[in-house]
Image (spheres, rainbow, N blue to C red):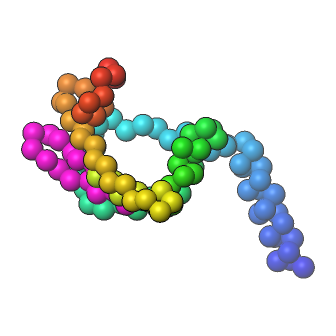
Amino acid sequence: MFNEAWSGFLYLCSLAYQALVPCTLPQLLMVKTINHQQYLGKWYFKAAVSHREADIQKFRVFDSMVFTIEEAANDTLVLTGNMRMGEDCIKQSWTYHIQPERDDMVMEGNTRAG
């Protein structure tokens, strides 16, 4: 009896806490403060999560993905993705330039200013 009452009390406390202190959006990290070496290697994409359905919709067609991040010359990172869409396997690479005077990375071929 005591265990059930205690369990119920803790459950109500956790519900009240979630109502008063909801999850906050993740804070974006500045490129200048990130150790780029820690992200090198192979990454497996298993699921997409977002607050907006439109953000998730573009990932629904992918069955599975494997990404590799490698460091290239002159403050450059190369992201290579192997993705399966239905019966097709797609391999694509993106090159990101780390610029010390900016707070973000610039994707090669992307003309948008950040």
User: At 80% from the left edge and 70% from the top edge, which residue is drawn?
Assistant: 7
Nearer-the-camera pick, 21 or 82: 82
Nearer-the-camera pick, 60 or 13: 60
Give residue 83's position: percent from left, percent from top.
40, 57
User: At 37% from the left edge and 38% from the top edge, which residue is drawn?
Assistant: 29
Give residue 35's position: percent from left, percent from top.
24, 48
Give residue 15's position: percent from left, percent from top.
77, 53
Check residue 76 for magenta coloring: yes
Does residue 56 appear left or right of residue 100 in this picture? right
Viewer can see residue 60: yes
Q: Is residue 114 above or below residue 1?
A: above
Q: What is the magenta range? A: 66-79
> Secondary structure of the magenta portion, mostly?
strand
Viewer can see residue 103: no
Question: Image quarter for residue 110?
Answer: top left
Nearer-the-camera pick, 99 or 20: 99
Question: Image quarter for residue 9?
Answer: bottom right
User: At 42% from the left edge and 37% from the top edge, which residue is drawn?
Assistant: 28
Does residue 92 appear left or right of residue 88 in this picture? left
Nearer-the-camera pick, 93 or 67: 93
User: At 47% from the left edge and 62% from the top edge, which residue is drawn?
Assistant: 87
Q: Residue furthest front?
A: 87
Q: Is residue 40 above or below residue 102?
A: below
Q: Residue furthest right?
A: 1
- Can you say which quadrant of the picture contains the C terminus? top left
Give residue 50's position: percent from left, percent from top.
58, 44
Check residue 100 for magenta coloring: no
Does residue 28 appear left or right of residue 25 in this picture? left
- Can you say which quadrant of the picture contains the N terminus? bottom right
Question: Image quarter for residue 5?
Answer: bottom right
